Amino acid sequence: MRVRLTYRTCVLGGCSIAIAVATLFATRAGLTPLLWIAVAAFAVSVAFVLAIATKVLFGVESFSFLHYQIAAIVATAVIARDALNLLALTLAIAQAFGRIGCANAGCCHGRGRFPLQRVESALLFAIAAICAMRIDRAFVIYTLAYAATRFALEYLRGDRRRSFRGVSEAQWICVATSIAMIAVDLAAIPVAAVLIVATIVRFEIELRVATARRLDFIGGAK
């Protein structure tokens, strides 16, 4: 129970701190602090409702922070697109604290129990700092930087995750996100290209491994 509270404290506390920090940049981002807080409250509510809905429908909460932040981004884009830069800064900070909670809870670790959560947390704080310095492009910076970071770190994860052909669900989302961002900013093209190539390479490796296993099985059956 203590570990669970520690994780929740990091997540809830991180979200609160993130929204407060983003409020300091509201004027620079073209919004009033009050409007930003209202938008942030709505985005958090959407993520919260999604969490409750999945638990009611499936009996367990199967979504990750990556899913919730996509829901928050979509919701914000619908009601106040100008708030996306502030939301990006908020997500970077909130998730940085969230990963500290993961480290305390023992989930999302690297291979051999390596504290990959703390590495990701440090990288997210760095991304947040860059977003704060370039708040006018924070959404593009965060989305692309995190897609590339998460895609790479997934190869080091040691816990079980849903995957297809050696590419995890999170990596697929990162690829899809980087491709979608091309419609927003052409800076997404090189990021999307790198992730697509990495995915194809992973496919080839998995195909060769699967082929080798089949040949070994056939040879053993003889």
Image (tube, rainbow, N blue to C red):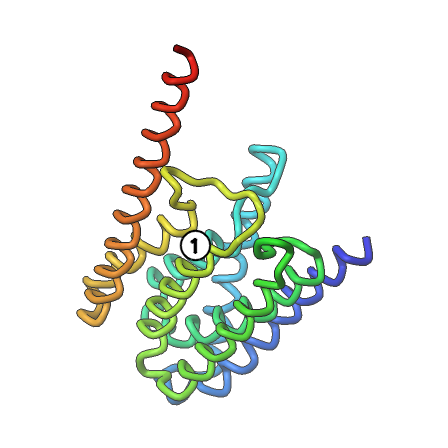
Residue at coordinates 38% horizontally, 38% vertically from top-left? 164
The quarter holding residue 96 reads bottom right
Q: How crowded is mark 1: few (under 14 residues within 10 Å), some or many (20 or more)?
A: some
Count the marks. 1
Q: Which residue is drawn at 81% across and 52% down?
A: 1
**Does dot 1 land on a helix, a strand or a loop?**
helix
Residue lying at the far right in this picture: please name it: 2
Instruction: Judge from the rendering whether residue 180 lies leftward or rightward of residue 77; answer left or right.
Output: left
Q: Is residue 219 above or below residue 90?
A: above
Residue 163 horizontal/vertical position (percent) = 43, 40
Location of residue 95 in the rendering, given as x and y in whole percent from the top left corner: 54, 66
User: Can you name the residue that lies furthest to the top here?
Assistant: 222
Q: In this view, does 98 lie to the left or right of 211?
A: right
Nearer to us in this view, 199 or 135: 199
Q: Can residue 72 be seen in this view?
A: yes
Residue 131: image x %, image y %?
40, 81
**What's the residue at 62%, 63% (across, down)?**
115
Q: In which quarter of the image is the C terminus?
A: top left
Residue that carries the numbered disc 1 in the rendered image: 71
Percent x, y for residue 56?
A: 60, 36
Q: Which of 165 and 8 is in front in this view?
A: 165
Residue 15 in sight in this render:
no
> In the rendered image of this protein, does residue 209 appear above or below residue 66?
above
Q: Nearer the viewer, residue 139 or 20?
A: 139
Give the left or right position of residue 162, taking residue 198 as reference. right
**Residue drawn at point x = 52 percent, y = 46 percent:** 63
Please state which amino acid type lies under the numbered disc 1.
Answer: Ala
